[in-house]
């Protein structure tokens, strides 16, 4: 099974396991609920789902055991919304102390400014070999799902740009679902990493 299909399968399974979004118990966060078992999970926005999926694929988490806080970092802490640890099934968000004094929690930092994020994107190494590679060849090398590749081609995407930098309105207009975008972003990141190892960027 290709990397993109594995990621899509895990993400879809996770969402299917917790089908009830915005539960009544934790309405202030992106809490999903399994109505049959009563388990709760703060899946959050697409980035958190991507991180959780990656942890499952690495064997560092399961569908019943959440990954440790190190996978999420400060950007995913539930700042001002209760606990920042125990983001998995059954771990509430604001319904009591979990015995953690927070000493090893990641530091909270201010979100980067738009200018800083743009600078980070500009300085982020892109494998030289990928810059002029046709999307079809790049997708084949990375193991992209064929349907996702077609949608990326429809919006004129090239390997010179990271998939995660595609504006939401653009990929939505191409008929790409959130799961497909998450999958494509993760596979793209893995592909670039493999290319950098094989042929380091000349940036």
Image (cartoon, rainbow, N blue to C red):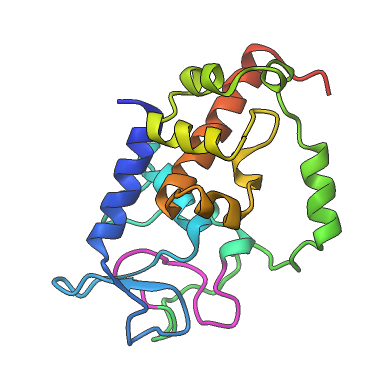
**Is residue 185 shown above or below 137?**
below
Say which quadrant the N terminus sits in: top left
**Is residue 193 shown above or below 24?**
above
Q: Main secondary structure of the magenta part?
A: loop
Residue 38 position, x and y percent, is 20, 75
Say which quadrant the C terminus sits in: top right
Query: What residue sits 71% from the left and 22% below the top?
Result: 131
Q: Is residue 59 visible?
A: no
**Residue at the outermost left position:** 36
Residue 155 position, x and y percent, is 58, 40
Q: Is residue 191 left or right of residue 93?
A: right
Q: How many marks?
A: 0
Q: Is residue 11 visible?
A: yes
Residue 192 position, x and y percent, is 61, 27
Q: Is residue 131 left or right of residue 38?
A: right
Dividing the picture into quarters, in which one does residue 17 lie? bottom left
Query: What residue sits 61% from the left and 19% below the top?
Result: 134
The stretch of residues the image draws in magenta is 77-92
Along the line of sight, the residue nearer the viewer: 112 or 173: 173
Residue 86 position, x and y percent, is 42, 66
Query: What residue sits 46% from the left and 78% below the top?
Result: 29
Along the line of sight, the residue nearer the viewer: 103 or 31: 31
**Residue at the outermost top position:** 198
**Residue 18 magenta-drawn?**
no
């Amino acid at each position: 099974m290709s990397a993109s299909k594995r990621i899509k399968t895990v993400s879809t399974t996770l969402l299917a396991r917790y089908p009830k979004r915005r539960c009544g118990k934790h309405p202030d966060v992106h809490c999903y609920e399994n109505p049959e078992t009563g388990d709760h999970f703060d899946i959050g926005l697409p980035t958190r789902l991507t991180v959780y999926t990656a942890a499952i694929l690495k064997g560092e988490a399961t569908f019943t055991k959440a990954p440790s806080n190190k996978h999420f970092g400060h950007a995913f802490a539930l700042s001002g919304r209760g606990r920042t640890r125990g983001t998995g099934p059954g771990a509430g968000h604001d319904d009591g102390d979990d015995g953690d004094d927070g000493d090893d929690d990641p530091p909270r930092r201010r979100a980067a400014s738009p200018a800083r994020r743009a600078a980070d994107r500009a300085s982020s190494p892109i494998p030289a070999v990928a810059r002029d590679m046709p999307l079809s060849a790049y997708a084949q090398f990375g193991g992209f799902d064929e349907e996702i590749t077609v949608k990326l081609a429809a919006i004129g995407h090239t390997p010179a740009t990271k998939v995660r930098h595609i504006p939401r309105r653009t990929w939505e207009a191409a008929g790409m679902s959130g799961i497909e975008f998450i999958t494509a972003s993760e596979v793209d990141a893995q592909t670039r990493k493999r290319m950098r190892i094989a042929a380091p960027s000349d940036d």
